Structures are given as C-alpha cells and as structure tokens.
Image (tube, helix red, strand yellow):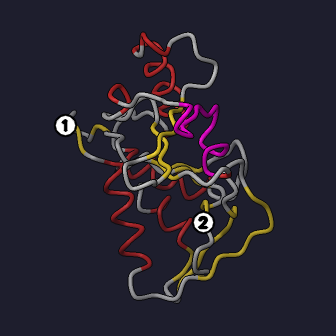
Amino acid sequence: MGATRVRLFGIDAPEGAQRCTDQHGKEWACGRSATRALERLTKGQEVTCRGDSHDDYGRLLAVCTTGSGEINNALVRQSLAWAFVKYSDAYRSSEAEARSSRRGVFAAENQPPWEFRAKRWENAIESVEADKQRDCPIKGNVSRSGERIYHMPWQSTYARVKIDEENGERWFCTEGDAERAGWRRAR
C-alpha cells in the first residue's frame, strides 16, 4: 500500500506507551509488545489491506492479511489487542477465547486502550497549568529545520514547547486536524 496509513478495523491494540499487568501483578510494556508482534506478523510479507472507509485521522479502516493469515485476528488471538466492539463484533469470539486462556492483556484486569487514551487526555489537560484554558491543547511548532511537528499534552517535550504564531506555529484540537494540515506527531 506504500504510503497509505491504515487503522486495523475491529480491534484496538494498546498504545505504545501503555503498560499492562500480568497474572503475577507485574507491569509489562504491552504497547511495545503489540507493536513488535505486528512487526513480526508483517516482516518480509506482502500485506494486503481491504477497507472502504476512513477514520477521523484519514487512515484507511481495513482488514489486513499476509500469506500467513489475517493480522487483525492474529493480534486479538495473541492477546495483544481487544475486539473493538464499539465498531464491530467481528473479533468478539477471538477475544473471548483469549480471555479464557488468561494470557497477554487478558492475564489480569487491564485498561483497554480507548480508556487509556481518554484518561491520558484527561490527565494531560489537568496537569498543564499554563495551557489549561485552551480549547485546543495540541501544540504545532516549527523546528529549526522547518519541519512542522505537533506535540500531545502527555509527551515529555510538551511543557518545553512554546508556540509562536508569528513563526507559523499553531494550536490544534485533534491529531486529525494536525495531520490533515501537514504536521507530523513528535516522536
């Protein structure tokens, strides 16, 4: 698909910074584990993604496959993603099976990624005193090299970034707004 950005339809994997608890109460980097699993599933494979709609960020909502099978379902079956039943029941039975085996993100009571994101926004807005009154909290700044980068309130660089609107910097209400305007997320 080249440069097409894809959101795996019907599932929701942990966020990159998200941590989960295992069956022994020990924390582990479930977000990074999900990313690594996706990399293993696709490495050296031809990936085919089929979908006909886009999310608010302009990503294709798709079911993706390789010669080894369907990626969306594999992540749920490996207990590294939740069935996103708000949008589809397609992976509900795979999640039930993963839950019954008490492995991965289902080994203990872990926060689903949609709750993690909502809480992260809530905490970030509350903790950023200087910008608390802003309706649109995402900072879009221009780097020394001219690159347009946006910063989320929970990112470590957020507090240091100062917006100079005369320099072309600006505020965004959503990541989708920032990306549609040609800005990329800070790493």
| Mark 2 residue element | loop
Residue 169 lies in the magenta-colored region: yes
Question: What amino acid type should be assigned to the residue bearing mark 2?
Answer: Arg
Q: Residue at x 49, y 30 (%)?
A: 164
Question: What amino acid type should be assigned to the residue bearing mark 1?
Answer: Lys
Q: Are marks 1 and 2 in contact (CB under 8 Å)?
A: no
Camera-nearest label, 1 or 2: 2
Q: Residue at x 55, y 50 (%)?
A: 12
| Mark 1 residue element | loop
Residue under circle 2?
A: 5
Q: Earlier in the sequence, mark 1 or mark 2?
A: 2
Q: Residue at x 80, y 68 (%)?
A: 52
Is 67 drawn above or below residue 157 in the view shown? below
Question: Looking at this view, is 11 or 102 the one in front?
Answer: 11
Question: Looking at this view, is 123 or 115 the one in front?
Answer: 123
- Rendered image quadrant of residue 27: top left
Magenta stretch: give its range: 165-179
Is 129 drawn above or below residue 70 in the view shown? above
